[in-house]
Amino acid sequence: VSPAQAAAGDGRPLVIAHRGASAYAPENTLAAVDKAAELGIRWVENDVQRTRDGELVVLHDDNLRRTTDVEEVFPDRAPWKVRDFTAAEISRLDAGSWFGPAYAGARVPTLEQFVHRVERHHQKLLLEIKNPELYPGIERQTLKVLGNEGWLDRSHVRGRLIVQSFSADSVRTVHELKPAVKTGLLGTPPVSGLPVYAGFADQINPSYGSLSTAYVASVQAFTGPHGRPLEVFTWTVDDAATAQRVAGYGVDGIITNKPDVVREAVDG
Ligand code: G3P
Ligand code: CA
């Protein structure tokens, strides 16, 4: 049983709703947070990007096409990158119809709106800083929004917030700016790199396809910046058999679009 599992008190991995419960509601919308809450899921993952006028918004792609009606609303604005639109323009887009008519009118939330909703449900947040190379200073800005929303106080920092990124530089920056905040490095770095990463990351969060019991144990053998063993949250696992397999590897958390399926698989 790893430290996070022991903290959960039951030896089972935590279940994290990927982009909200995104198999059942449009990803990274408030509806997807609500759906996770309805399913009794405590942890929600999201992705953060920045608009042209400097607002942080919650969206996975650096482009608005896949998950909004931007091409209809702004036909002349190809290639429809998030960073080329203002927050006011993005707030006009429909981020739900692509998923299903029941979600028509869902919006791209600002980070502030997203955090509010997570707070309202008393949930916990695994926040991913997306494409930080496109958005200089996004780490400081993300921490500022979190601080304004009360998410850098002791209780949030101690058990309700993790900031992760695929960029080691970005994770290091978050750690240096706010050492109390728990951080995660996405990907599957070689074990030889872990002594460095363990200086600023509390977690190593790999795709499940690259995992093994030996790799998980190697990661957990390192001590992170807060004096506790490194943890492993893996993604994106949506079926019961895979969830049981990775739970058997000893992972601390499973990030999933179907948190109900994974919860039942690891509870059973
Ligand atoms: O939280 C892990 C996972 O979200 C990383 O991949 O592409 O879904 O952001 P992606
Ligand atoms: Ca993500």
Image (cartoon, rainbow, N blue to C red):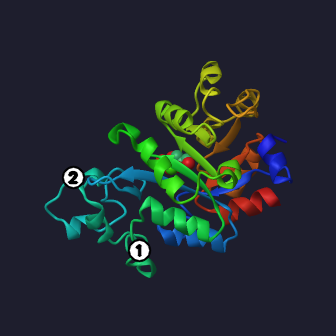
Q: Quadrant of the C terminus?
A: bottom right
Query: Residue 225: x percent and y percent?
Result: 67, 31
In the picture of the structure, the residue carrying the numbered disc 1 is: 106
What amino acid does circle 1 point to?
Answer: Ala
Reply above or below: 119 against 254: below
Which element carries disc 2, helix, strand or loop? loop
170 sits to left or right of 201: left
Q: Secondary structure at mark 1?
A: loop
- The percent position of residue 21, horizontal first and vertical second, equals 57, 65
**Dividing the picture into quarters, in which one does residue 80 lie?**
bottom left
Label 1 Cα neighbours within 10 Å, binned few <14 / some 14-19 / many ≥20: many
Residue 200 placement: quadrant: top right
Give the mark, 2 or 1, whose residue is nearer the N terminus. 2
Q: Is residue 79 left or right of residue 161?
A: left
List the residue tagged with mark 2. 79
Q: Is any part of residue 132 visible from this angle?
A: yes
Say above or below: 162 vs 102.
above
